[in-house]
Amino acid sequence: MYEEVTWLNFIGNRYEVVNSDDVLEINKIYKARDVFYRKNVLIKVIKHNNYICEDFVSNLIDESTALDEINSPYILKIIDVGIHCTEETTLYYVVSEDFNGIGLDELILGNYLHLEAIVNIMIQVLKALEMIHRNHSYHGSLKSSSIIVDTEYNIKICDFGITKANNGVNTRSYGNRRYLCPHQLCINYTDKESDFFATGLILFESIFKKLPFGESNSEEKMLQSIDKGLDWNSIKAINGNTELINVIKRLLGRNNKYTRANDIIIDLSKVMYEKAYIEVEDEKEEEQKQDKVIQFKKEYKSKMRKKLHKKLVVAGLAIVMISMIIISSII
């Protein structure tokens, strides 16, 4: 669910939204048409609130330039930002390059993800974070709807630069609160640890189809839920794969935290090795079962042949004896 505003024919007198109904949902990505350059783009609008600073748009222009220099294949490039004022409110719009895919949140709701796809998607996310963190920056508002996935499970991440452009304070656009780490909720401080926490939330959501700490819009209740923690004993490993649960524990826990995206990538890769090992073992077990069945059939056929042979010998002897009796009686 998203917060909604009255339908807009054109945003910034330039971008025509092409996949919407009668209302425009805040903080949701739409396909749009740039009528100036006659090309397809992606666009989202952010509603002004008390968390957004005065220099947000100018700062975001600077951040989009910095992202271009990083040039990651996993990051959606920002091509325009601006302000759109209506009678109701002030909206900020962010225009990005076109990418043919849907949000990870929609894939999760549609149950279209298997374990291998989830791990593949998250490794790409972490590769993007690794590049950003190496350049002394962060995402700061990562959530499942920020990750766009195509039919081959290739991804592009949007919303990079938005939190940093807001002086490191999350904009609290609709839906963002559920993915914030404790120090973002408490003191509005964002760092790469915030990204790792959000990664853990998204990984949990992708697997279990829900967020681990609920979906309250109250920041106080969110903090209480996070502080309470999770009952990991009640959370079952997928296909017996405890490695995956251990990754999520480290991402969401207070102790033994990850400090580098590459370390998480390594541990997620182990998950796939474990899955492959399980599949190989299953194949071996199946082959062994098939071998036993074949051996049983061979032994069964051999026993049947022996029984048949005995029956034929007995029958043959009986025929000989009967023949001898008949002959002797004739004589």
Image: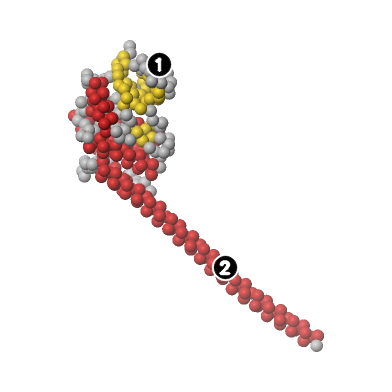
Circles 2 and 1, Cβ within 8 Å, touching? The answer is no
Q: In terms of secondary structure, where does tag 2 sit?
A: helix
Q: How is colour applied across the structure in the image?
A: secondary structure
Residue 210 visible within the image: no
For the view shown, which residue lies furthest in the top direction?
A: 87
Residue 331 badge: none
Q: Residue at coordinates 28% horizontally, 46% vertically from top-left?
A: 266
Q: In this image, 48 relative to 117: left or right?
A: left
Which quadrant of the structure image shows residue 218?
Answer: top left
Mark 2 or 1: the one toward you = 1
Residue under pointer 2: 301
Q: Is residue 310 left or right of residue 56?
A: right
Q: Position of residue 95 (x, y in %)?
A: 33, 24
In the image, residue 66 sits, relative to residue 12, either above or below, namely: below
Residue on which the image places disc 1: 9
Q: Quadrant of the N terminus?
A: top left
Q: Give the Cα distance between marks 2 and 1.
A: 79 Å
